[in-house]
Amino acid sequence: MSRIGKKPIVLPAGVQVELKDGLVSVKGQKGALQRPFLEGLEMDMIDGTITVRRRNDDKRSRSYHGLMRTLVANMVEGVSKGFEKKLEIVGIGYRSELKGSDLALFLGYSHPINFPLPTGISAEVEKQTLVTIKGIDKELVGQTAAKIRDLRKPDPYKGKGVKYAGEVLRKKAGKTGK
């Protein structure tokens, strides 16, 4: 039995979960999310807790048991608290600014990069070198932060580029002259 799949999901106040027509819907104070519910699994709601269980013990059901429980738990947390990722921009002249629903990034190229934010995602520029990506969908927040980081990955020699806040970079030693 899956250790993660067995854990119950506790619903915070104001969050409603519904399973209908193969879709699990979660509504809360920050918004609503929907996701297809995987076959071979069932969801039980008892006294404000959700339990995901398997109908049978075939390999596919066992492999998806913990995954589906985690996906539903992330949806519940997202509509109640939300998710955020912080990105740091390191380098001389590297900066960012918010222009409407686009994020303008100056990353050492000849022109600024206008990054359109997907629907459901918001960004805050606290300093010109610190960007916070916020949203209720954990997968979309992480994917957006990864795409922004891919625009200029941290250089292994100088450390310049876009990195996650708290990310530890292993710097390489450069060439030494005689």
Image (cartoon, grey):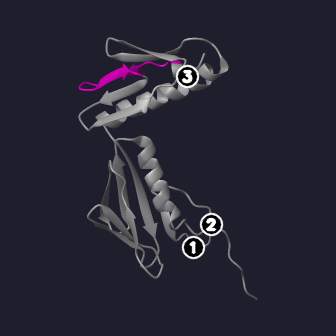
Above or below: residue 174 compared with residue 35: below
Q: Is residue 170 magenta?
A: no
Cα gap from disc 1 to disc 2, whole angstroms? 7 Å
At horizontal 66% and vertical 68% (from top left) the residue drawn is: 172
- The residues bearing labels 3 and 1 have C-alpha atoms spaced at a distance of 44 Å
| Kind of residue sitting beneath label 2 | Lys
Magenta residue span: 6-21
Q: Residue 171 carries which label?
A: 2
Q: Please indicate whether residue 79 sits to the left or right of residue 150 in the image.
A: left
Chain-order first, disc 3 or disc 1 = 3
Estimate the x, y position of residue 98 in percent, counting from the top left: 30, 66
Q: In this view, does 88 lie above or below 92?
A: above
Number of the label disc, if any, that sits on residue 158? 1
* Kind of residue sitting beneath label 3: His
Q: Earlier in the sequence, mark 3 or mark 2?
A: 3
Quarter of the image with the C terminus in it: bottom right
Asked whether disc 1 touches disc 2, contact meaning CB atoms under 8 Å apart, the reply is: yes
- In the figure, 88 relative to 52: above or below? below
Mark 3 lies on residue: 65
Q: Can residue 96 be seen in this view?
A: yes
Q: What residue type is labelled 1?
A: Lys
Label 1: few (<14), some or many (≥20) within 10 Å? few
Using the rendered view, name the quadrant where residue 12 is placed: top left
